[in-house]
Image (cartoon, rainbow, N blue to C red):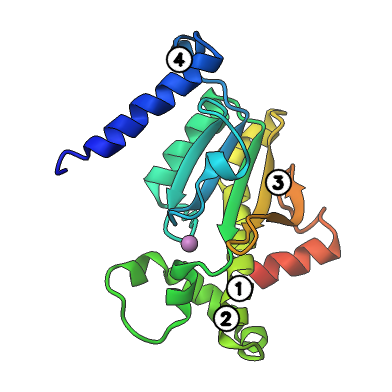
Amino acid sequence: MHRLNYLLESNRNWAKSICANDPDFFKKLANQQKPEYLWIGCSDSRVPANQIIGLAPGEIFVHRNVANVVVETDFNVLAVIQYAVDVLKVKHIIVCGHYGCGGVQAALENFRHGMIDNWLAGIRSLSRIHREELSTLAQEAAVDRLCELNVLAQARHVAHTTILEDAWERGQEVAIHSWIYSLDNGLIKPLRPPFTEPINFSTGSMKDAVDEIAVSD
Ligand code: CO
């Protein structure tokens, strides 16, 4: 019981079922990984990257943290993005949040949760920027709207890293997607068209510029 034998047993069954379909599956994967996608999502156990978009091992590079936050000073996420873009040469970066996110909800609450409040500081700033809109909504709707705004802001943070700016500058094709997942029906909704080039006030549309101001933190 203490050794989690049931999970190890489950693992053996899983490996067996994969091999039954493709006897060389693990041999091929062990030699290389060539995923086309990087997933930046929430640690929430209900939002497992591979399963919800139906991808097999080897098909997506994954980074998850509480509330899918991308902070430009977080070496963890920067290392993942750099490896994904510069070495794996992924074509797509998917920032995927989810409605009802506990981290986002915590950022809206006016009491201490512990160290996590520091991690969520950027989302708290975002809620202050949007307090006018958020204050008109019922509590659950306000959390869900902030979940959307958070995805948009974090996707922009990815676009603003030197890693993406340099990749686009040298002509590498990589798109950043802003997606949100619904726990209620298992469906993903894209929130805006993907970023495929540096976000630039002088060349972007007025709508983009307004969005940029609205969601930056
Ligand atoms: Co979450």
Q: Tell me the SS state at disc 3.
A: loop
The disc at residue 73 is none
* First-in-chain label (4 vs 3): 4
Whether residue 159 appears in this view of the structure is yes
Q: Residue, x 56% and y 86% (percent of image)?
A: 139
Mark 2 Cα shell of 10 Å, populated few (<14), some (14-19), many (≥20): few
Residues tagged 2 and 1 counted as in contact (Cβ below 8 A): yes
Amino acid type for the residue under numbered disc 3: Pro
Amino acid type for the residue under numbered disc 1: Asp
Taking 197 as reference, is 73 left or right? left
Residues tagged 4 and 2 counted as in contact (Cβ below 8 A): no
* First-in-chain label (4 vs 1): 4
Mark 1 Cα shell of 10 Å, populated few (<14), some (14-19), many (≥20): many
- Of circles 4 and 1, the one toward us is 4
Q: CA distance from mark 2 to mark 1?
A: 6 Å
- Of circles 1 and 3, the one toward us is 1
Residue position marked by numbered label 2 in the rendering? 140
- Of circles 2 and 3, the one toward us is 2
Q: Where on the picture, by quarter, is residue 106?
A: bottom left
Q: Tell me the SS state at disc 4.
A: helix
Residue position marked by numbered label 3 in the rendering? 198
Residue position marked by numbered label 1 in the rendering? 144
